[in-house]
Image (cartoon, grey):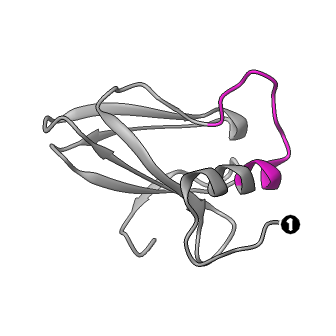
Amino acid sequence: MCSRPVRWRVLAGLVCALSLLARTTVGQPFLSIDSPNVVVSDVKQAEDGNDLIIRCYETAGRATRASLDLGLVHRHWTGEFQPLEIKTLRVPLTTAGRIREVNALEQ
């Protein structure tokens, strides 16, 4: 099982998420986003559970629609970004829960 430091960086979060999921498919990306001006800046485990927290932001200063695909957990999210907006998404590791936007405190 992964140790759980206070803050994970992207690489540590991805490694831990992959070990938690243990459902890898050869050649399938863990995470992809279809908009070149939206960047995923952080992936970590939620502070109060096993959900994943994904932080992403718009970089070009223009409103954008972006789709995020989490191939390993067969989940998809589409949303609207305002110019330079930061979004925090909470992703349940089960397919039963929906991906939802939360605040920076993960609430």
* Residue position marked by numbered label 1 in the rendering: 1
> Quick one: SS at disc 1?
loop
- Left or right, residue 33 beside residue 1: left
Where is residue 84? Give x, y as percent.
19, 47
Quarter holding the N terminus is bottom right
Q: Main secondary structure of the magenta part?
A: loop
Q: Residue at x 38, y 40 (%)?
A: 39
Q: Residues within 10 Å of mark 1 (few under 14, many from 20)?
A: few
Where is residue 60? Give x, y as percent.
18, 34
**Disc 1 marks which amino acid?**
Met
Where is residue 94? Give x, y as percent.
72, 52
Where is residue 24? Give x, y as percent.
82, 35
Quarter holding the C terminus is bottom left
- Left or right, residue 32 beside residue 2: left
Q: Residue at x 62, y 50 (%)?
A: 11
- Left or right, residue 101 beside residue 17: left
Q: Residue at x 23, y 32 (%)?
A: 64
Is residue 18 one of those drawn in magenta? yes
- Left or right, residue 19 beside residue 105: right
Nearer to the camera, 45 or 93: 45
Residue 67 sits in quarter: top left
* 4 shown above or below 32: below
Give, as a single range, the part of the protein colored magenta: 17-30
